[in-house]
Image (cartoon, helix red, strand yellow):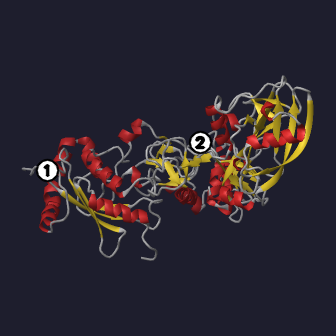
C-alpha cells in the first residue's frame, strides 16, 4: 500500500472480527487490508434463504469520504443486483455518508435481500419479471439460490469460514 | 484551551486597564487608569478604585460585556487587552451591593459565558480560535452598557435589536446591544462559528471515533471532529455536491446517516482553506446564477463565467461581461446553428441526449434506470417523460 492504513479501517476490521454481525462475515485479505472477502447468508424470510453469497468489498483511498465498492461474486436473481454483481443501493452512491461503515453497508445489503426493491432496478429484466409475476420471480430466485449459493455454503463450511449463520432451512424443490 | 493559557503567560503579570466610572449618586463621570494583576479578582479592583477615588468599594458594581461581574471573578478570565474598557457603576443612593452568595448562581454563569466558550474564524490567525464575546451600544458603540436581558441563544447574539441595553455613555432611550467576537489570541474581530463547540461529554466523532476537544455539532448532537469535517467538506467540494438550501445557500448536511440538519453559516467552510473556500464561493455563485431563469454560462472554453443576461433587449444572444464573447443562448455558438440542418455535432447531441426539464442541460443516459438525478441543478426527473419524477414513473417507466 502506498499510504498507511487509517486508524478507522483498523478499528472497523477489528470490530468486524470481534463482534460479527449475525449472518455476515467480512475478513480482510491477507495481502491487502482494504480488500475484504465477505459472506452473507440469505435471510430466512427471503427466496435467498439457505444460500450463502460471496461478495467482495474494497475500500478506496478516499474512504470513508467515498463509499466502499461492493460486488456480489455469487450469481443471484435479484432486481437490484445485475449480472456483474453490481448492487443498486442508494447508500453506495449518492446517499453515502462518511459516518456509515462496512458493517452498516453489509447490513443494508442483507436487508436488500429481504426486501427487493423493483422500483429502483439495476437488472431491468429481473425487475420486469418481479413486477409482472412476483411468484414466478421468487421461484426463479429460489432456484438460483439452490444452484449457485449452496456451493458457497458448502465451501464456507468446508473451510470453517468464520461465518455466524442464522439458522436456515434447506429449501426443497 | 492551550492558547488561553499561553496568552495569560505571555502577558505581563500586571497591566493597566481603563476604567470608566459612572457615579449615579453624584451624577459624575470619570475615567481612570488602574494597574491590575492577572491573578487579582474584581473585589481587589474595587478596593484599588476606592483608594484612588474614595468611593466605598461595596457601593461599586463592575460591569463588563454588558453584565455585572461577581466579586470573585479573576481578572485573567476576562482576557482583557489594553483597549478594553471596564465600567464601574455607583448606585444612586450609595446602597451596598448585594454579595456574591445571594446572586451566586446567576453571576457564576455570567462570568463563564463571557470567558470565551465560543469559537470563531480568525482571519489573522487563519484558523478556528476561541473567541470572546464583547458587547457594545448599537448607537454610540460605547462599551459602557448593561444588558437588560440575558441572550438566550445564538439568534439573540447574531441578530441585531434583540437585546435591549442601558447605555451609560449616550444614555439614549430604547438602545440595543451589538455583539462582536474577538479572537482570544490576536484580538481581531471575526465571524462566530456557531456549530463549533467544546466536546464536554468527550463523545466520539461519528466519522473517525476520535474524542477531540473541539467538535462540529449542527444542533443535532451528532458530533464530528474538525479534521474529519474538513475532509468531508473537501470531498463535497470535489464534485460540488453542496445542496442549495435557502436561506443558507449551497451547504451540506450532518454526516450522520438520516440526519437532516445542515450547516447554517458558510463561514464554517473556511475550515477547507483559502483557495478551497474561494473555489466554493465562486462555484456556489455560479450555481445560484444558473438556477435563475436569467442565468447563463459563457460557452467560451477559456472563460466559463456565469452571469445574468438582461431580459429587456432580448434577441436570443448574449455577451459575456467578462470576456465579451458573444453567443446564441440556445445553441451556445458564436455563429448560431439553431436553424442549420447539417450540423453533425448538434444532431448527434440531439439524438443521444434529453434536456433536463429544469435547467435544460443535455443529459445522456448510459445505463441504469429512467430515474435521472441532474448533477447540474439537482432536479429528479424521468428520462421517458422528460418531466419531474413521479410515482407513476416509478411504477411504469423504470425499465424504459
Q: Chain of mark 2?
A: B
- In the drawing, does residue B247 fall left or right of residue B183? left
Q: Is residue A82 above or below residue A45?
A: below
Q: Is residue B316 visible?
A: no
Of residues A163 and B189, the one nearer the viewer is B189
Q: Is residue B180 above or below residue B352?
A: above
- In the drawing, does residue B55 fall left or right of residue A62? right
Q: Chain of mark 1?
A: A
- In the drawing, does residue B101 fall left or right of residue A163? right
Residue at the far left: name it. Answer: A172
Of residues B386 and B4, the one nearer the viewer is B4
Residue at 80 percent of width and 43 percent of height: B313
Of residues B188 and B254, the one nearer the viewer is B188
Residue at 18 percent of width and 48 percent of height: A47
Instruction: Name the secondary structure under disc 2.
Output: loop
Q: Is residue A160 above or below residue A93?
A: below
Of residues B50 and B357, the one nearer the viewer is B50
Q: Quadrant of residue B248?
A: top right
Give residue A167's mark. 1
Instruction: Name the secondary structure under disc 1.
Output: loop
Q: Residues within 10 Å of mark 2 (few under 14, many from 20)?
A: some
Residue at the far top: name it. Answer: B93
Q: Is residue B27 above or below residue B290?
A: above
Q: Which residue is mark 2?
A: B245
Residue at 64 percent of width and 28 percent of height: B102
Residue at 43 percent of width and 54 percent of height: A93
Amino acid at each position: 500500500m502506498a499510504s498507511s492504513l487509517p486508524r478507522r479501517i483498523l478499528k472497523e476490521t477489528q470490530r468486524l472480527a470481534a463482534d460479527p454481525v449475525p449472518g455476515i462475515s467480512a475478513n480482510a485479505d491477507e495481502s491487502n487490508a482494504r480488500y475484504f472477502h465477505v459472506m452473507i447468508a440469505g435471510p430466512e424470510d427471503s427466496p435467498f434463504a439457505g444460500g450463502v453469497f460471496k461478495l467482495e468489498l474494497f475500500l478506496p483511498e478516499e474512504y470513508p469520504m467515498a463509499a466502499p465498492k461492493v460486488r456480489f461474486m455469487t450469481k443471484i436473481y435479484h432486481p437490484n443486483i445485475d449480472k456483474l454483481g453490481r448492487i443498486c443501493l442508494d447508500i453506495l452512491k449518492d446517499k453515502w455518508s462518511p459516518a456509515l461503515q462496512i458493517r452498516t453497508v453489509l447490513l443494508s445489503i442483507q436487508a436488500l435481500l429481504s426486501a427487493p426493491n423493483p422500483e429502483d432496478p439495476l437488472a431491468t429484466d429481473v425487475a420486469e419479471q418481479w413486477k409482472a409475476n412476483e411468484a414466478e420471480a421468487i421461484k426463479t430466485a429460489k432456484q438460483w439460490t439452490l444452484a449457485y449459493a449452496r456451493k458457497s455454503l458448502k465451501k464456507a463450511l468446508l473451510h470453517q469460514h468464520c461465518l455466524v449463520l442464522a439458522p436456515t432451512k434447506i429449501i426443497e424443490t | 484551551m492551550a492558547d488561553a493559557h499561553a496568552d495569560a503567560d505571555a502577558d505581563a503579570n500586571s497591566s493597566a486597564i481603563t476604567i470608566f466610572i459612572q457615579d449615579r449618586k453624584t451624577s459624575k463621570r470619570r475615567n481612570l487608569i488602574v494597574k491590575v494583576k492577572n491573578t487579582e479578582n474584581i473585589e481587589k479592583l474595587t478596593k484599588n478604585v476606592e483608594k484612588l477615588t474614595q468611593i466605598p468599594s461595596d457601593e461599586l458594581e463592575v460591569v463588563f460585556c454588558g453584565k455585572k461581574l461577581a466579586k470573585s471573578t479573576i481578572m485573567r478570565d476576562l482576557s482583557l487587552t489594553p483597549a478594553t474598557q471596564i465600567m464601574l457603576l455607583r448606585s444612586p443612593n450609595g446602597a451596598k451591593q448585594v454579595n456574591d452568595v445571594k446572586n451566586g448562581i446567576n453571576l457564576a454563569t455570567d462570568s463563564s459565558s463571557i470567558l470565551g466558550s465560543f469559537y470563531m474564524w480568525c482571519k489573522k490567525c487563519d484558523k478556528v480560535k476561541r473567541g470572546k464575546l464583547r458587547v457594545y451600544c448599537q448607537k454610540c458603540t460605547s462599551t459602557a452598557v448593561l444588558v437588560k436581558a440575558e441572550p438566550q441563544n445564538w439568534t439573540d447574539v447574531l441578530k441585531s435589536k434583540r437585546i435591549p441595553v442601558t447605555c451609560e455613555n449616550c444614555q439614549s432611550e430604547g438602545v440595543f446591544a451589538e455583539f462582536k467576537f474577538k479572537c482570544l489570541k490576536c484580538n481581531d474581530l471575526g465571524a462566530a462559528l456557531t456549530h463549533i463547540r467544546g466536546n464536554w461529554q468527550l463523545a466520539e466523532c461519528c466519522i473517525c471515533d476520535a474524542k477531540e476537544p473541539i467538535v462540529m455539532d449542527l444542533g443535532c448532537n451528532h458530533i464530528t471532529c474538525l479534521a474529519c469535517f474538513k475532509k468531508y467538506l473537501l470531498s463535497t467540494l470535489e464534485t460540488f455536491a453542496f445542496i442549495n438550501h435557502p436561506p443558507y445557500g449551497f451547504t451540506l448536511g450532518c454526516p450522520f446517516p438520516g440526519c437532516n440538519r445542515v450547516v447554517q453559516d458558510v463561514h464554517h467552510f473556511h475550515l477547507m482553506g483559502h483557495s478551497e473556500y474561494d473555489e466554493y464561493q465562486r462555484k456556489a455563485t455560479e450555481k445560484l446564477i444558473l438556477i435563475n431563469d436569467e442565468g447563463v454560462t459563457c460557452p467560451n472554453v477559456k472563460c466559463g463565467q456565469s452571469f445574468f443576461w438582461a431580459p429587456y433587449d432580448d434577441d436570443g444572444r448574449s455577451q459575456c461581461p467578462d470576456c465579451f464573447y458573444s453567443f446564441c443562448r440556445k445553441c451556445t455558438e458564436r455563429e448560431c446553428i439553431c436553424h442549420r440542418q447539417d450540423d453533425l455535432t448538434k444532431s448527434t447531441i440531439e439524438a443521444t441526449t434529453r434536456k433536463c426539464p429544469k435547467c435544460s442541460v443535455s443529459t445522456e443516459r448510459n445505463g441504469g434506470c429512467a430515474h435521472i438525478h441532474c448533477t447540474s441543478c439537482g432536479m429528479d426527473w424521468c428520462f421517458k417523460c422528460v418531466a419531474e419524477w413521479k410515482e407513476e414513473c416509478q411504477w411504469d417507466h423504470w425499465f424504459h
